[in-house]
Image (tube, helix red, strand yellow):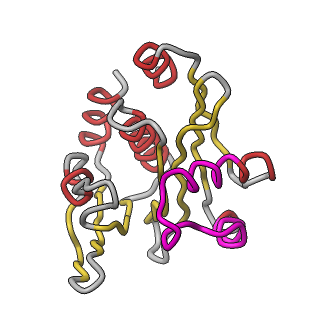
Amino acid sequence: MAEAKLSTTLGGVCKITVHHDLPPDVLAMVMLIEDKQFRKDQFYSLEELEERSREAGFICFLYSLDGKPLAYDLGYNDEEKDIFFSDSSATVIERKGVGAILSVLEILYCFENGYKAINIMCEEIDQSGRRLKEYWGKFGYRVTKIDEKAHFVDMRLDLTSELVKSLGKKYIG
């Protein structure tokens, strides 16, 4: 359903693939997206991405349109039991629902796999001027910690069946 919705919205053939490791071709696609979307101080190196792919519970959702990689979302088990850490996500296509749909797919995946919550850490405002604390808040994430000096925010989404159903219906259909 997510692929169909994005294909219609963006006028091309959407493909969303799920990976539990980062083989060289997928790793190259993730790095290509990162290079386009992140400042160099926030860019993961090849080694850092490979290290994250070895974390327990690792998953990467990769979105492509007409065969071109345009977005990803990845995470793994948090240090807390039954908690998922959503580490990184990026999309080359802004404000068309791609990021929201990938986020909801991650939320659905976590709920279906028995996670009780999802933790994220983000900037309050990113390099494009987006207010990330507010963006994640619309999915139901709440602030758990603010680092005033670094302008980073820790947030948590407690997973309930009602929330997951609501987000799925709203963003995917």
Quadrant (top left/top right/bottom left/bottom right) for the C terminus = top left
Q: Nearer the viewer, residue 70 or 159?
A: 70
Dominant SS type (magenta):
helix
Q: Is residue 28 above or below residue 108?
A: below
| Picture coordinates of residue 102, whole percent (x, y) | 45, 40
Q: Nearer the viewer, residue 121 or 119?
A: 121
126 in the magenta segment: no
Write the residue at 48% across / 52% down.
Answer: 37
Left/right of residue 55 with respect to residue 1 in the rendered view: right
Boundaries of the magenta span? 29-52
| Picture coordinates of residue 137, whole percent (x, y) | 20, 53
Q: Is residue 18 above or below residue 151?
A: above
Q: Is residue 65 above or below residue 80?
A: above
Question: Disc count in the image?
Answer: 0
Left/right of residue 131 with respect to residue 98 in the rendered view: left
Which residue sits furthest bottom?
Answer: 149
Q: Nearer the viewer, residue 149 or 80?
A: 149
Left/right of residue 131 with respect to residue 87 in the rendered view: left
Write the residue at 60% across / 50% down.
Answer: 60
| Picture coordinates of residue 32, whole percent (x, y) | 64, 50
Write the residue at 40% across / 17% down.
Answer: 9
37 in the magenta segment: yes
